[in-house]
Image (cartoon, helix red, strand yellow):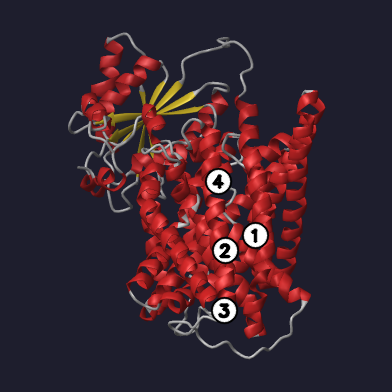
Amino acid sequence: MRLTDLLLGRSLANRELRQRKLGALEGVPAMGLDGLASSAYGPEAALTILAPLGVLGTRSIWIMGPVLMLLAILYVSYFQTLRAYPTSGGAYTVAKENLGREASLLAATALMIDYVLNVAVAISAGVGALTSALPSLGSHTLTICLVILGALTLVNLRGTREASRLWAVPTYVFVASFFALIALGIVKSLASGGAPRPVIAPPSLPRATEAVSAWLLLRAFASGCTAMTGIEAVSNSMDAFRDPVVKEGRRTLTAIVLILGILLAGIALLVFTYRIGAVNQAAPGYQSVLSQLASAVAGRGAFYYVAMASLLAVLCLSANTSFTGFPRLCRILAQDGFLPAPFAAVGRRLVYSVGIGYLAVTAGLLLAAFGGITDRLIPLFAIGAFLTFTLSQAGMVGHWLRELGQGARRDRARHRAQLAVNAAGTVATGTALAIIIAAKFLEGAWITLLAIPLVLALLHAIRRYYDELARQLGCLGPLDLRGAEPPIVLVAMESWSQLTERAVSFAVSLSPDVFAVHLTSLRGPDVEERKHDLLASWQRQVERPAKEAGLVPPRLVVLDAPHRKLHVPLLELMGRIEKRHPGRTIAVLVPEIMKQRWWENLLHTHRARRLRSALLHYGGSRTLVVSIPWYLEEPRIEDAVESARPTRRRA
């Protein structure tokens, strides 16, 4: 078995795509892990901002209430969006249809940046949970982050369905564990009259160093809003669902939002009840909020470690939401000409492998730049998501306004209600976005705001390239054969050999104007070239047989290469030929020994490859470059077909 088959699985045929679609049960692990995991770092981010209030900070966790209200508005809004636009692309598609190209590109840019940040934040938060349970690993935070990123990348390259099924167990264990933990904590709170005694007391809260202020609460709200990133994932990846697409998408969205809402509300309540605050992640002995909560409610027995292990898994795996949505968004952008074409190509496992690889590399660089510390990454987070939310909701407002103008009268009342929902969503998410930008700007949000126009400029530059390419390649009419004549053929040769004989024989069949070009001094000043022997051999082996056959004999041209560069004297010769024969095509035949084993590459100078590359780069549109291969062992086409045919076993 080949290594690629072992790591990635067998190559899948196009017809197998239908079998790899997801239902709601698989959709939650594939697209909901970002949202579910944000229940860990959303409340913690808010509590970090409230830490200067001391004990009063835990009482101010009610700030998660407005976050839950905003979550409800987004749920209703996206529930409508899934029916109106049951294709992938989410905010990009909605904005393109209703707000124009620039708005759609802004949405796509914000979403791409947010997806990269989500991977970095999710993995760093997961490793933070791990170091909470095993503090001795704290010094290896970045290494663990990168190992987890590599594992996630590999699994997603195997396919979306494989990833969703593999992540299903830790996802549902996490949900069951923390639902049980919240239920147990609420029962204990009710039994104790609202003052339960923790099994293991959380770290004591520091004395207050600040007073409550509107600005502090707004900053806490902005940090808490990170709990809503990932809600748009279902809308962005609708093509991953099996039929009926809208029904499966809505089921998945409902499950994600319901679970997230319960987790956020329960965590906020127990944080208040048990007086749990945030601890500096970079400090020795760091304990995450959920680690403190689990210890306080259930102690550090088997249940604690099961819950924390599932939390670690879900936090790290929540990056899978980006691995599901990011490549699909990139595919749509590439199809529209705003990203390189390889982003739209399907890989061996029917996933968009280039998008997955690009996401992994950029997230890895981000983790390395910030040391894998969640608190350093959080300020960059959420801006992209809320900008996307706002543009999506505004686009839906435009959609319903158009429906009101074009739809039947009996549907107007329903369309007005739907318009009101999306209008409220636009105002709510736009307000939240303004708060997030203001609150996080100096903490690092300026980096995200700077990145957005840079990415936009890159998308426009790529589209300009493709537009210019299309303009130049555009068909001008029927085939024009006027003035067509055989090309002038140049054959690059080292010596008279069977390889050269094959190239010259082919050249003579193309044109009467054939020049064999031999370059001297390629091996350095100490090697004597036997020009006379070559000329004598050429007259005897080439010119005489050609004349006897009634053909124009190919001419031998010997050029000096004083700097040991093949392409320079050859290009100079081509320039002289172009001046002498303007408008004629020049075909350059490059004989080459094909290397079929890795070690054979070590035994050759690869001059043919370098010459071919230089000619393609500098030769111009009237230059044709043709490879003349020579095989030490003749390959079989059947072998290539057989090696590409997948095995019969199921993936």
Which residue is tagged 3? 193
Q: Is mark 3 on a helix, strand or loop?
A: loop
Mark 2 surroundings: few (<14), some (14-19) or many (≥20) residues within 10 A: many
Which numbered tag is attached to residue 179?
A: none
Q: Which of marks 3 and 4 is in front?
A: 3
Residue at 66% x, 61% y: name it: 67
Q: In which quarter of the image is the N terminus?
A: top left
Please report contact status of discs 2 and 1: CB closer than 8 Å, yes or no. Answer: yes
Please say whether residue 377 is visible from this viewpoint. no
In space, the residues marked 4 and 2 are separated at their CA atoms by 16 Å
Lower position in the chain sequence, tag 3 or tag 4: 3
Q: Quadrant of the C terminus?
A: top left
Kindly give the residue lying farthest to the bottom in the view shown. Answer: 207
> Residue type at mark 1?
Leu
Which residue is tagged 4? 253
In space, the residues marked 4 and 1 are separated at their CA atoms by 15 Å
Residue at 56% x, 40% y: name it: 250
Lower position in the chain sequence, tag 2 or tag 1: 1
Q: Position of residue 190 (x, y in %)?
A: 54, 73
Please report contact status of discs 4 and 2: CB closer than 8 Å, yes or no. Answer: no
Asked if residue 573 lies left or right of residue 597, the reply is: right
